Image: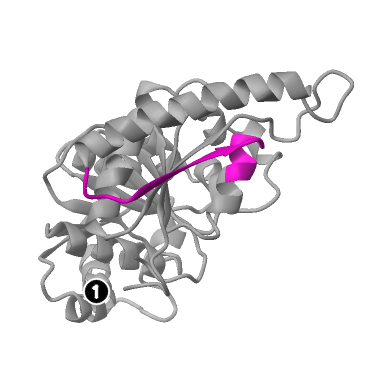
Amino acid sequence: MTTSGNPPVVAAVNGSAHSMAAALWAAKEALLRNAELLLLMAYGFDGAPFGNRSFPPDAWLKAKEAVTEEVLREFRVECESAVPEVKMATAAVDTGPIAALTEISATARLLAIGAPAGETAGLFTRVSTSRLSSGTFCPVVVVRGARQSGPVVVGVDGSPLSEEVLAWAFEEASVRKTPLLVLHAWHDGDVAGLFTGESALPFPGESVREAENRVLGQRLAGWRKKYPQVPVDQVVVRDKPRQRLLEQSEKAQLVVVGSRGRGGFAGLSFGSTSHALVHHAKCPVMVVRATGRPAG
């Protein structure tokens, strides 16, 4: 699937080793998609007062800007050395990181950020959700691990969001030329996660597992036709999805999941599966929210 134009892949950096990993991952993703890489660093505050003023002093901002520009130069050199074929740009933003990432997400293909640590970890706590004025408009990839091989793994359930999640998962598997493992897991306390319901009742004598496997196959039929080059492995298990996805992350190059939260980075806080993955997965994790935008 494609969007109009060719939106950039954006990497949020802050000078840390975690954000360097995110930048290098984003550079390779941009190469796969023949897109530009934008290295973005925000050095302001997300609406927090500074003393009795609404904004930090100009001298403080100038100093932070200088440090930010130097960090961006260093990151650009590293990325150009690792992936010289990719066109790159940098942006130093004087707002807070949440505001900057939310705004840039409207024109980005996807956002890549480092594994939660220090300030970044705050993006995944309930405390930060009250500071968000709007949700992101593209998927967020939390870069964990550095695996370059293995399948793309996608977790799906019976929610409408699963269609957007599948769109991104098939697209990622296609551009990476790797198999796709589609995992559907449910447990007794998660009836809402089942595919079978009023519109897809089990056949007489059919077990829940058999019914879920059948309906998932029907869901995937259209995607298999659209991406015939992508080998698909369909797995249906009775278990908590986060545990199975964590296990699969040990041999995957990317895990794709949806956010059941209220939108944007807030969604990463309220979806227990996505929350567990961004903190504990062994590979990068893409979190998709409902935006209505096509994948790719």
The one nearer the camera, 148 or 215, is 148
Q: Quadrant of residue 13?
A: top left
Vertical position of residue 238 compared to residue 168: above or below: above
Name the residue type under label 1.
Leu
131 left or right of 233 in image: right
The one nearer the camera, 137 or 83, is 83
SS category of the residue bearing label 1: helix
The N terminus appears in which quarter of the rendering?
Answer: bottom left
Query: x, y (%) of residue 178?
Result: 12, 57
Is residue 281 something one can see in this rendering? no
The one nearer the camera, 16 or 72, is 72
The C terminus appears in which quarter of the rendering?
Answer: bottom left
Q: Quadrant of residue 165?
A: bottom left
Vertical position of residue 103 compared to residue 144: above or below: below
Q: How is the image coloured?
A: one colour
Q: Which residue is mark 1?
A: 220
**Magenta residues?**
84-100
* Residue at (20% x, 43% y) in the render: 248
* Residue at (51% x, 54% y) in the render: 260
Vertical position of residue 51 compared to residue 205: above or below: above
136 left or right of 243 in image: right
Query: x, y (%) of residue 17?
Result: 35, 22
Give the total of numbered labels: 1
The one nearer the camera, 151 or 247, is 151
Q: Is residue 99 magenta?
A: yes
